[in-house]
Amino acid sequence: MLLLLALLEHHNTAVSSALSATTTRKGTLMIETALLAAALHLSTSETTGVTSSGSTANGRELSLQQPSRGAYSQSLRAAATVPAKDKRWAQCVLTRESGGVLHNKQSRETARNPTSSAAGRWQFLQAWQHGGSFMVKDRLVKFGIPVAEAKQVRKYLGTTPIHKWDGIWQDVLFNEVIARGGKHHWNGGSHSC
């Protein structure tokens, strides 16, 4: 019930009408039922949404182009944060691949290799764009982003070149590749990490 109340805290009108409907009835079960009914009648656009611009009045929409400014920004940052055990290695790879800085998600996000299709902070090849967008979606769901919003992110990333992805999306993909045992994709290069 506490989770349901937390979900509805931004919807005082719906909660008030649900509680008003139960004032003549007694018992916690009736209140819980009314709250659940109110929650089920809330539209998805009232609770969250997805926007490409990131400019929203209520700040509750997931921004595709500026993910650190929209809804779920804390979950997104967590999904994009390299685990402590891999930080040293990841900084070495990032320096080698694009000259980026690990703690600055926007550093070198637009980097492009002049002799291949490699692009972005981690120099993903263009072939990663489609499959990588699905990997990002999977990781977002693991970190608590609702499936509907994660699918919108996947659709956006699947049609956007990696060097145009926000650095957070690039880091989410990198972390998911690593989580699936993909460190070998960054073996070799001009210096070893």
Image: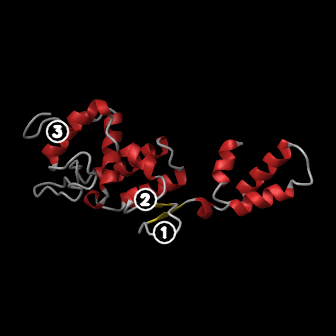
Question: Which element type, helix, strand or loop, lies under badge 3?
Answer: helix
Give the mark nearer the N terminus: 1 vs 2. 1
Distance between the alpha carbons at the discs numbered 3 and 1: 37 Å
Q: What amino acid type is highlighted by mark number 2?
A: Lys
x%, y% of residue 55? 44, 69
Helix, strand or loop at disc 1?
loop
Is residue 145 at least partly visible in the picture? yes
Give the class, few, some or many, for how many residues have Cα within 10 Å of label 2's Cα (few <14, many ≥20).
Answer: some
**Residue 125 shown left or right of residue 33 in the figure:** left
Amino acid type assigned to the residue bearing label 3 in the image:
Cys
Give the residue displayed 25% in from the left and 34% down from the top: 183
Cα separation, mark 1 vs mark 2, equals: 21 Å
Which SS class for mark 2? helix
> Which residue: 14% across, 55% down?
113
Give the residue type that dot 1 points to.
Answer: Thr
Q: Is residue 60 left or right of residue 179?
A: right
- Tag 3 residue: 92
Residue that carries the numbered disc 2 in the rendered image? 155
* Sequence order check, earlier mark of 3 and 2: 3
Inspect this view and state whether residue 137 appears.
no
Q: Is residue 142 left or right of residue 181?
A: right
Above/below status of 105 relative to 186: below
Q: Which residue is mark 1?
A: 56
